[in-house]
Image (tube, helix red, strand yellow):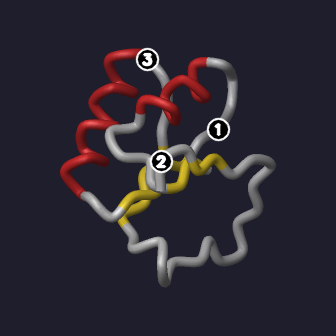
Amino acid sequence: MDLAAGEGRNAVWLAEHGWEVDAVDFSAVALVKAGRLAVDRGVRLGTVHADLTVWAPGEVTYDLALIAYL
């Protein structure tokens, strides 16, 4: 999970290296760009449009949480 993923560069990099990644960000525009980057690079990327100050992942578990620029 990449929190505050922005346009998804870190999330896509992780996906290129074999991780299953969900990119979470408050900007729908940034997440669209992240999705395009993933398609261009040939990887799968899940996106979650959410405010991180109130969002919780629910029943999903993650092995890694990346917060690079929050």
Residue that carries the numbered disc 1 in the rendered image: 20
Residue that carries the numbered disc 2 in the rendered image: 69
Cβ–Cβ under 8 Å for marks 1 and 3: no
Q: Residue furthest bottom?
A: 54
Q: Residue 52: x and y, percent?
A: 47, 72
Name the N-terminal-most of marks 1 and 3. 1
Residue at 25%, 37% in the rendered image: 33
Residue at 39%, 58% in the rendered image: 25
Q: In the image, what residue type sits under mark 2?
A: Tyr
Q: Residue 35: x and y, percent?
A: 33, 37
Question: In this picture, is 12 found above or below 25?
Answer: above
Residue that carries the numbered disc 3 in the rendered image: 42
Density class for disc 3 (Cα within 10 Å; few <14, some 14-19, many ≥20) is few
Q: Residue 50: x and y, percent?
A: 39, 70
SS label for mark 2: loop
Density class for disc 2 (Cα within 10 Å; few <14, some 14-19, many ≥20) is few
